[in-house]
Image (cartoon, rainbow, N blue to C red):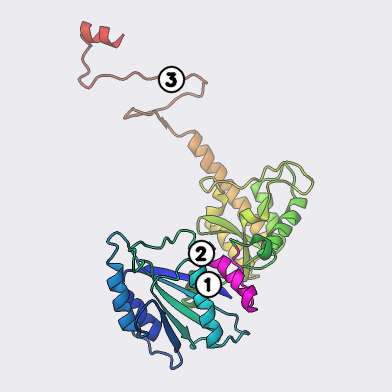
Amino acid sequence: MLAKIAPASNDFHALARYLVRGKPGSTPHPDRVAWTFSQNLPTDDPDLAATYMQATAQLSQRTRRAAYHFMIAWHERERPDAELMQAVARRTLVLAGLAEHQALVMGHGDKPHRHLHILLNRVHPDTGRAWKTSQDFARFDRIMRLLSEEYGCTYTPAHVFNPDITDATPKKPNSRATYAAKHGAPTNRLQWSKASARGFGRTLSENLTPSSTWDDLVMAIADHGLALERKGKGLVVGNADSYATFSSLGLNITAKGHPRLLRHRSHASAPSILSVDGIDIVRALMGFGLADRDDLIRAVNDAKHERAAHRKQRQHAPRRLAGLGTSLTIPQTGLMVTPHRSNSTDRPLSNAAARSRR
């Protein structure tokens, strides 16, 4: 059993229509609405309930996105009946401090797993105060854990809030990644469990020394049929089926306890080697078994020569001094050159101006 929070909205009617019909323009599933009940509302009709909630939300002119929407789902192998699902919904609202708020609860039967939706009015019907959503995901996760034990259901822990439980559990793609995968993006990969990532990090550390370079790390990863690649703003290690974030490998210290040279680099300096198209291509091919370690070594060597040439070119490039409009070439003598500023008219200073400068 788990809770999932959807984006809040200002439009109660739009959310009520979604609960009944699904996405705009789609044909509603014949079993989409299994049952409905309301809390602190005089009706169970979704559209009329939305009208009441919209009017109540006007009690707080400062509240934005008063229409709050979240779901409770069970594992596909569990078949709770309507009575149990409704009891869980009511207990969830009570434990979250929402027993006095308006809510429309709807059970759906259009998926293999049993689930329900709750459309909630954050604005209290009497006080006009809005329920605060800070830490709401953590709050509902704790409630799901409690109610799973109370009703004998299977609790699905959130990785971020239950590291002791999820340490050995792989992480599935989130909703955005799954949606992108349906449209052809290569995002539908499992993320290694934290225990697996640490274990692989220890294996890598055994083959690295304090004198190891970034290229040595790339080679060591390639020896295991994996590739180091960018993902979002960070780095990951993996193949076409699964991956682990680079930071989760725990490569700060080697298995022998020696301090490591290969600390996680900042994104600004993280390997210019990674920005080379040839290496990126070879790594991608290795992930699909179309290239081997020798191909990667050749690509890395080519990148080294290119990087050395670029560094040599930069050393001979003119340096620009801050505050000057021209570029001055400074000999590598170790002397610090401090340019003086001239006034805008290039005229000598008057005696009064000179005294004021002293």
Q: CA distance from mark 3 to mark 2?
A: 58 Å
Give coordinates of residue 350: x percent, y percent. Answer: 20, 9
Q: Is residue 276 visible?
A: no
Q: Please name the amino acid that badge 3 sits on.
A: Val
Disc 3 crowd, CA 10 A, few/some/many (<14, 14-19, 20+): few
Question: Which residue carries the number 2 mark?
Answer: 137
Question: Which secondary structure lies at badge 2?
Answer: helix
Relative image position of residue 213 (x, y in whole percent): 67, 45
Q: Which residues are magenta?
A: 139-159
**Dot label at residue 130:** none
Disc 3 to disc 2: CB gap under 8 Å: no
Is residue 204 in view from this perspective? yes
**Amino acid tagged 1:** Ala
The residue indicated by pointer 3 is 337
| Dot 2 or dot 1, earlier in sequence | 1
If you read the primary sequence from the N terminus, does the residue marked by circle 3 or circle 2 appear first?
2
Q: Which mark is residue 3?
A: 1
Asked if residue 59 lies in the magenta stretch, the reply is no
Secondary structure, magenta segment, majority class:
helix
User: How far apart are the alpha carbons under marks 2 and 1?
Assistant: 8 Å
Residue situated in front as seen by the camera: 10 or 146: 146
Marks 2 and 1 in Cβ contact (< 8 Å): yes
